Amino acid sequence: MKTIKYIFVLLLWSNFVQSQDIHFSQFDHNPVFQNPANVGRFNGDYRIHANYRDQWRNVTVPFQTFSISGEVKQIYKDFNVGGFLTNDVAGDGSFRTIEFQPSVSYTYKLTSDSVHLLRPGIQFGINFRSFDASAFTFDNQWNGSQFDESLSSNEVFQSQRKTNFTWGVGAAYEFQKGKRQRIIAGLGLFNINRPNQGFFGEKIKRDMRFNFFTQAEYKVGFDWDILPSIQLNLQGKYRELILGSQVRYILEDRLGNYKSIMAGIYMRSSDAFYISAGMEYQNYWAGISYDINTSNLSPASRSRGGLEFSFRYIIHRFKPEIIKHRVCPDFI
């Protein structure tokens, strides 16, 4: 029994360390994590994003993921710098992944009017992984009627922590015809050095991940826009295709005041579809999405997947002064 339990734990954690990178449903609102070439792709001087995801709460111990990123645009000529920090916790053993990835991108103007832009980018950083072996129970802790955590398991783990270095590259093309007319497409390759993820002596290399994304923004009316987007992730045997669109209604856009609301629906192949909603107010964005599981796990999860929140804030060094003009009646 003890041997079977130990083998099970080894297989469980081997599966975790070979698993795919973390992912977010609201990939449009986590650009630095998506591709280092997205660093600096915004109208402003500084940008901050925060994302939180909670999933599988109805099935087991919830998987929770938090991400925060920051950017500085044109810190030197056309170079942009940024980075993200993620903290992902999963399962009974609190399998934790902390990753810090600084990024650099360069904005290359393909045309003098900046209608066509190309941004290459690179990211590099550190990945920390750990788990809590004391959260597991073994046959030696069975007292005849129940598992007693105060009893010794007599199990010895070589290591419960792992640190490694990883890096990736990306490139993105942007075509912007107008304020509300643009197309962006990008490619990225991550975990290029394939760092060792093994905890128990055997080398288990992290698979490289390929990412493709495209986003568009189309003006379809005076106050209406559609924002379709697609993302494809390939990592080892894992395949993830997400496609969908948001619709934006502009409540106000005059005299320096801006307000809009957005709603959308997306499909993640062979896994789930999700709905999203959000609001922009001046330089702020706040969004929420909810996954509805459609995979083989749906009977256990009761079709409930994950809840996700996103937040964004853009800072301008200099704010233009808004001059209010008084309109005089025609008879004066």
Image (spheres, rainbow, N blue to C red):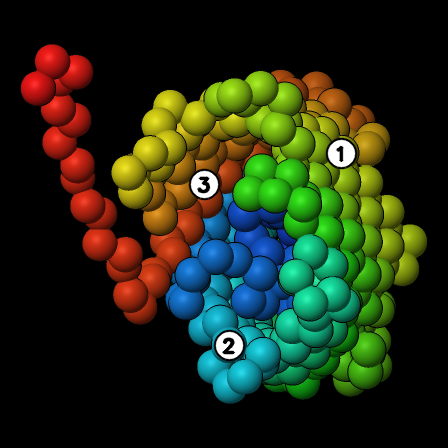
Q: Amino acid at mark 3?
A: Phe
- The residue beneath circle 3 is 309
Q: Looking at the picture, which amino acid does disc 1 mark?
A: Leu
Residue 37 falls in which quadrant of the image?
Answer: bottom right
- Compare residues 242 and 8 and report the one nearer the observer: 242
Q: Return the residue at label 1.
A: 243
Identify which residue is drawn at 74% across, 23% down.
294
Type of amino acid at the residue the image marks with label 2: Gln
Q: Secondary structure at mark 1?
A: strand
212 horizontally vs 24: left or right: right
**In this rendering, would 252 be left or right of 197?**
left
C-alpha distance separating marks 1 and 3: 19 Å
Q: Looking at the image, do the residues carrying marks 3 and 2 touch, with CB atoms under 8 Å apart?
A: no
The numbered mark, 1 or 3, whose residue comes first in the sequence reads 1
Q: Nearer the viewer, residue 52 or 318?
A: 318
Please report whichever mark, 3 or 2, sits nearer to the chain's N-terminal start. Answer: 2
Q: Closer to the camera: disc 2 or disc 1?
A: 2
Residue that protrudes farthest toward the right in the picture? 237
Q: Residue at x 37, y 53 (%)?
A: 313
Q: Answer whether labels 1 and 3 touch (C-beta < 8 Å).
A: no
- Which is more N-terminal, label 1 or label 2? 2
Task: Give the residue displayed 38% in from the left and 56% down from the top.
Answer: 314
**Residue at 17% across, 36% down:** 325
Instruction: Pick whichever, 12 or 184, lies toward us.
Output: 184
